[in-house]
Amino acid sequence: MTDKIIIAPSVLSADFSCLGEEVEAVCRAGADWIHLDVMDGHFVPNITFGPPVIKAIRNRTEKVFDCHLMIEPVDSFLAAFADAGCHYITVHAEATTHLDRSLQAIRDLGCKAGVSLNPSTPENVIEYVLDRLDLVLLMTVNPGFGGQAFIPSVIDKVARVKTMIGDRPIMIEIDGGVTPETAPLVSRAGADVLVAGSAIFKGGADRYAANISALRHAANNAARPPLQKER
Ligand SMILES: O=C(CO)[C@H](O)[C@H](O)COP(=O)(O)O
């Protein structure tokens, strides 16, 4: 467990033709977690990959696999993602009718349970499931694509969720448009985990360590509240 920010590269921006090598390279470069963006072409207007691809890269690293499901329906697929080796499984509040049931199902599978909120979704949707949560993923872009611009109005939401969580062991993760310029803004508001795709994978494998280090440095140097511990 660390009291520093956790950096989770999103393989959405990796070279899919050699995904296993990309995962190894980014882990060697200092990644803390690997973030897996699963898209279905229905809940979001893009399609990526599913459990077989995750299973295929699972043996490339021991690092935490942090799976962000942008799919609807979601409950019937949870077991396949747990079986593929995901540690955290995050569902969108907007994509499940029975959020409490989905979160219980993730924990029953032995995984840590996360909920993601689109930029326009108010944070009060998580008020009655806080005891079922290990992670809240706040989208700072509209989900579906990498390389989009950070939406600054979410910064206030990060601070409000931090207050709502109190001393519960729930991590706040930020996803979308995270760069050395935006990382301090969310870090200061209470983020524990930063997902970044383009800011890490740009420039090729020789740049991964410098890109991760720039994000980590920018986030850790912001004046920040105490980081949430992992459960
Ligand atoms: O979930 C996502 C998109 O739905 C991606 O993880 C996110 O956009 C990261 O990409 P980038 O850092 O390039 O913005």
Image: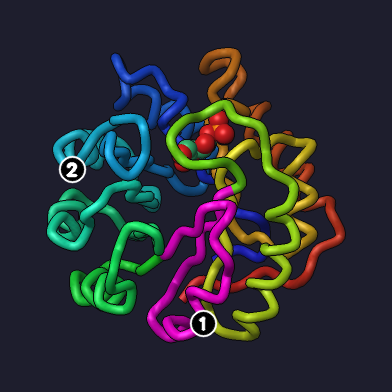
Which segment is the magenta one?
Answer: 115-139
Residue 59 in sight in this render = no
**65 or 118: which is nearer to us?**
118
User: Residue 104 at what x, y percent from top left?
Assistant: 26, 78
Lateral position of residue 32 relative to residue 144, left or right: right
Give the percent coordinates (x, y) of residue 84. Answer: 18, 49
97 vs 137: above or below: below
> Residue at coordinates 62% horizontally, 72% vertically from top-left?
228
Read off the residue under disc 1: 127
Tell us which disc is closer to us: 2 or 1.
1
The three-letter amino acid code for the residue at tag 2 is Pro
Identify the image quadrant of the N terminus: bottom right
Q: CA distance from mark 2 to mark 1?
A: 30 Å
Answer with mark 2 or mark 1, whichever residue precedes in sequence: 2
Instruction: Say whether residue 6 is visible.
Output: yes
Quarter occupied by residue 177? top right
The residue singled out by tag 2 in the image is 51
Q: For residue 19, which quarter of the picture?
A: top left
Residue shown at the point (76%, 43%) measured from the top left: 217
Q: Amino acid at mark 1?
A: Glu
Query: x and y percent of residue 124 in the render?
Result: 56, 76
Image spot of residue 173 (x, y percent): 56, 57
